[in-house]
Image: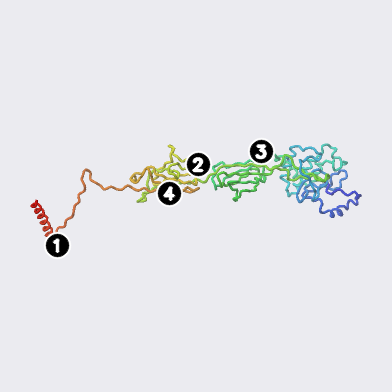
């Protein structure tokens, strides 16, 4: 590649040429060629009027950005080179690239365009020239050709690279063959039931053209109605190096959690930017990619709740066994709902009925949350029927919250104990106690006398009335 710009017409002769780099380049430092990573191949491949002693095989810096060039033997770009809008990359001869080669170039630009390795940079530059400037017939390697018509001598340049860079060429070529596009991306949703605020595993796989998993691919995930690791809604992650699926822990925060994954995939055809100066090499960058994406959606519900009811004697607080209780909504008649929104009913289609155990308790689990429920007594247990009102049976209500147990207590008033009456007998006989005295009591005698006088008066009155008739 021609690292030195074309000399002005007035400069001639080998001695003068030898001094150009020392005299001219500092004067145009603002527009000097800026090489990036790579190696010089020495001596340079010969062709007509080649001004360079070596061929730079690696990246360049244009506008502060690392780029690679095609159109071998054209002038190297300076740091401020002006370029035209991108267009499909073609060979140096203006012909279309083989579709597989085009996809391999796009892949390498995407995967190695930001490399910090001199070996990888040299390997990428070498492969680009090998695919775009290889001779279409032997005559194009004739040194009498000028820079526009000379082909890239692939074997010559490869043999001049360091052994580490030669190995990198083989590695990158094998990588491109195995993993070129078009890529695809798939997403796996959790298979189990999703519960709000409880994490589940999603998977992301990036596949090459053969359907094999690709490793070390940067992907961007965006979650809605859910959070990614760290409580974030967006995360930049990378697929495992071995190409296995990326496993991501996603926590639903709503009823319809969704995850979208997007990534850069190599284009079917790489993009090239021709220089405004027609004698300068064309630039190719990491712009040869397209965005691909996929998404997945599932459903989630709140953690189910439980209701536990304890039936107690209102007086003794002893547990009551065998009390029939049904679970209803807050209207005390319609069935309560399970975690999936279904009605909790028995075989008769009515609200589910359960009986208290020996400890006086019964539990209803797997309930939708939050939900207002009531526990209603359907029939009184033995010994508690007197206070039972079938039109307004005992009940207790409350709200079941996600993942919680609602604890309720329902009291029963025991029957009143009746007074015992002997079978077939009359009312009970009341008996007064008498006190026996051994001698007269003056007060008692006075009282007795008064009673006698009162009795005599009553008798006399009756007799008088009789006479007056």
- Relative to the observer, which residue lies in front, 159 or 125? 125
Label 2 vs 1, first from the N-terminus: 2
Mark 3 or 2, nearer chain start: 3
Side of 269 where 304 appears, left or right: left
Q: Nearer the viewer, mark 3 or mark 2?
A: 2
Q: Provide the secondary structure element on which disc 4 rests.
A: strand
Labelled pair 4, 3 in contact (Cβ < 8 Å): no
> For the residues marked 3 and 2, what is the alpha-carbon distance in whole angstroms?
40 Å
Q: Which residue is mark 2?
A: 341
- For label 2, the SS is loop
* Few, some or many residues within 10 Å of mark 3 (<14, 14–19, 20+): some
- The residue closer to the viewer here, 130 or 242, is 130
Instruction: Single out the mark in the foreground, 1 or 4.
Output: 1
Q: Quadrant of residue 259?
A: top right
**Measured Cα–Cα span from mark 2 to mark 4:** 23 Å
Q: Earlier in the sequence, mark 2 or mark 4?
A: 2
Q: Which mark is residue 211?
A: 3
**In the image, residue 237 lies at what x, y percent?**
64, 47
| Residue corresponding to mark 4 | 408
- Mark 4–mark 3 distance (CA, rounded to whole Å): 58 Å
Query: What residue do we see at 83% from left, 48% from top?
Result: 3
Give the percent coordinates (x, y) of residue 376: 41, 44
Q: Earlier in the sequence, mark 3 or mark 1?
A: 3
Residue that badge 1 annotates: 443
| Colour scheme of the rendered structure | rainbow
Asked whether the residues under the numbered discs 2 and 4 touch, taking CB atoms below 8 Å apart as contact, a structural biologist would say no
Rendered location of residue 252, percent (x, y): 56, 46
- Disc on the earlier residue, 1 or 4: 4
Which-is-in-front pick, marks 4 and 3? 4
Give the number of the mark in front: 3 or 1: 1
Q: Earlier in the sequence, mark 4 or mark 3?
A: 3
């Amino acid at each position: 590649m021609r690292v030195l710009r074309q000399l002005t017409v007035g400069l001639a002769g080998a001695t003068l040429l030898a001094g150009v780099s020392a005299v001219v380049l500092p004067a145009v430092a603002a527009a000097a060629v800026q090489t990036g990573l790579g190696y010089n191949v020495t001596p340079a491949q010969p062709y007509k009027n080649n001004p360079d002693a070596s061929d730079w095989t690696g990246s360049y810096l244009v506008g502060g950005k690392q780029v690679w060039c095609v159109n071998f033997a054209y002038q190297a770009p300076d740091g401020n080179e002006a370029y035209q809008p991108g267009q499909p990359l073609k060979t140096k001869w203006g012909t279309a690239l083989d579709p597989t080669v085009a996809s391999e170039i796009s892949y390498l630009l995407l995967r190695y365009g930001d490399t910090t390795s001199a070996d990888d940079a040299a390997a990428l530059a070498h492969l680009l020239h090998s695919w775009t400037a290889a001779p279409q017939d032997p005559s194009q390697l004739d040194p009498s050709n000028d820079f526009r018509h000379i082909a890239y001598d692939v074997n010559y340049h490869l043999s001049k690279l360091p052994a580490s860079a030669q190995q990198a060429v083989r590695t990158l070529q094998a990588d491109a063959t195995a993993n070129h596009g078009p890529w695809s991306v798939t997403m796996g949703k959790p298979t189990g039931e999703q519960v709000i605020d409880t994490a589940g595993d999603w998977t992301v796989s990036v596949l090459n053209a053969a359907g094999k998993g690709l490793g070390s691919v940067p992907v961007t995930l965006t979650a809605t109605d859910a959070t990614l690791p760290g409580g974030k809604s967006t995360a930049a992650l990378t697929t495992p190096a071995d190409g296995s699926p990326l496993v991501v822990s996603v926590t639903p925060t709503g009823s319809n959690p969704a995850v979208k994954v997007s990534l850069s995939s190599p284009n079917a055809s790489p993009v090239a930017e021709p220089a405004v100066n027609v004698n300068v090499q064309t630039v190719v960058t990491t712009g040869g990619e397209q965005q691909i994406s996929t998404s997945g959606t599932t459903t989630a519900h709140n953690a189910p709740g439980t209701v536990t009811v304890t039936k107690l004697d209102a007086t003794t607080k002893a547990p009551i066994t065998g009390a029939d209780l049904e679970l209803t909504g807050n209207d005390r008649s319609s069935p309560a709902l399970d975690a999936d929104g279904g009605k909790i009913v028995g075989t008769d289609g009515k609200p589910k009925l359960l009986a208290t155990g020996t400890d006086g308790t019964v539990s209803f689990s797997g309930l939708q949350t939050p939900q207002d429920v009531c526990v209603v007594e359907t029939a009184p247990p033995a010994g508690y029927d007197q206070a039972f009102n079938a039109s307004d049976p005992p009940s207790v209500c409350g709200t079941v919250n996600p993942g919680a147990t609602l604890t309720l207590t329902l009291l029963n008033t025991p029957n009143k104990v009746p007074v015992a009456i002997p079978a077939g007998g009359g009312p009970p006989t009341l008996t007064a106690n008498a006190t026996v005295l051994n001698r007269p009591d003056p007060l008692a005698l006075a009282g007795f006398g008064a009673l006698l006088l009162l009795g005599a008066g009553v008798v006399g009155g009756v007799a008088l009335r009789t006479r007056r008739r």
